[in-house]
Image (cartoon, rainbow, N blue to C red):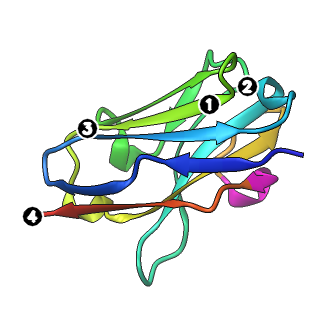
Amino acid sequence: QVQLVESGGGLVQAGGSLRLSCAASGRTFSSYNMGWFRQAPGKEREFVGGILWSGGVTYYADFVKGRFTISRDNAKNTVYLQMNSLKVEDTAVYYCAAGAGGQLSSTINSYDYWGQGTRVTVSS
């Protein structure tokens, strides 16, 4: 069982930066692949990026490549999403998710545990 708690969301102007954190409980955090997803009002939840359990591999959606960076600290049971050059269209609730082993995936069904989300609002 893994419990996830996101933090770090807020209001930021376009072009600004935010860093989201996702703190996990449980001693097996280091064995889970971690993903970040987002859901904008009226839209479906979409994959933002993910990081392999070891931290050695990351994978990003095309719309965030070069702007967002995912990292993890297994000693702290925490995964991060650094968001730079934010755009108004990045406004959404951001969720972290944990998926047990295997290949890194962008599909929602590959993740077993989800946080409650943190809201990011980017103003123009």
Above or below residue 110? Residue 60 is above
Q: Residues within 10 Å of mark 2 (few under 14, many from 20)?
A: many
- On whether residue 109 falls in the magenta region, the answer is yes
Q: Find disc 1 in the rendering and name its residue.
A: 78
Q: Tell me which numbered mark, 1 or 4, is placed earlier along the sequence.
A: 1
C-alpha span from label 4 to label 3: 15 Å
Badge 3 amino acid: Asn
Residue drawn at x 31%, y 59% is 90
In this picture, residue 49 sits left or right of residue 98? left
Q: Tell me which numbered mark, 1 or 2, is placed earlier along the sequence.
A: 2
Q: Residues within 10 Å of mark 4 (few under 14, many from 20)?
A: few
Residue 25 pos. (x, y %): 77, 38
Question: Which numbered dot is residue 124?
Answer: 4
- On whether residue 108 falls in the magenta region, the answer is yes
C-alpha span from label 3 to label 2: 24 Å
Q: Which range is magenta?
A: 107-113
Where is residue 30, by image quadrant?
Answer: top right
- Quarter of the image where the C terminus is located: bottom left
Residue drawn at x 86%, y 29% is 28
C-alpha span from label 3 to label 1: 19 Å
Q: Find disc 3 in the rendering and name its residue.
A: 84
Residue drawn at x 46%, y 78% is 43
| Residue, far bottom | 42
Badge 2 amino acid: Trp
C-alpha span from label 4 to label 2: 36 Å
Q: Find disc 2 in the rendering and name its residue.
A: 53
Question: Which numbered dot is residue 39?
Answer: none
Question: Circle 3 sits in a helix, a strand or a loop, which is it?
Answer: loop
